Image: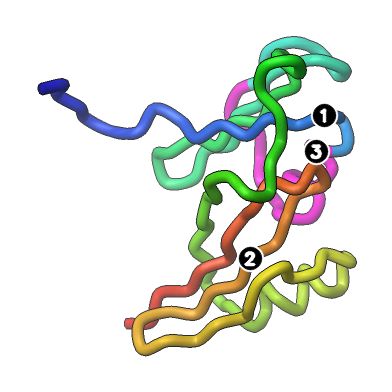
Amino acid sequence: MIQTSSFAFIGYPVTDLKRARSFYEGVLGFKPAATWGNEETGWIEYELNGVALAITNEAPEKWKPCRDGPAVAIEVVDFEEALAHLKAAGVPLILGPGDSESCKIGVIADPDGNSIAIHYKKS
């Protein structure tokens, strides 16, 4: 059995690094924790609570964006405020919003179609 200690990072392939950074930094408000490469081709990591979400366009032939693949879920402090911000930025929900006994959730996509869940865990 492999012994693990934590997730190292979650990775999303993107086609246009500049456009992706505009979305992740401008719309979602993420701050780069680490960057490699340049403005055209590179690897950017955004860290939230000890886990990094990486975006890259370094292997476009082998790693392609996909709406039907896995999705990262980001926890928000105020679900309705987050949805209003996304709507004002022109980012549509592709699923939801949903409301259950334990959480509220909606799914958006980055400019390449990678799914991102907006999640609010109820106390």
Mark sitting earlier along the chain (2/3): 3
Residue at position x 50%, y 35% in the image: 10
SS category of the residue bearing label 2: strand
Mark 3 vs 1, N-terminal side: 1
Image check: 121 left or right of 39?
A: left
Residue 25 magenta-highlighted: yes
Instruction: Tell me, for residue 20, which label it has, or none.
Output: 3
Distance from Cα at disc 1 to Cα at disc 2: 20 Å
Residue topped by disc 2: 107
- Give the farthest residue toward the left: 1
Tag 2–tag 3 contact (CB < 8 Å): no
Write the start and end of the magenta stretch as one range.
20-34
Which residue carries the number 1 mark? 15
Q: Label 2 to label 3, Cα distance in Å?
A: 17 Å
Residue sitting at x 73%, y 45%: 24
User: Residue lying farthest front?
Assistant: 68
Up/down of 48 relative to 53, above or below:
below
Residue 21 sits in which quadrant?
top right
Q: Secondary structure at mark 3?
A: helix
Type of residue at label 3? Ala
| Relative to 53, 22 lies left or right | right
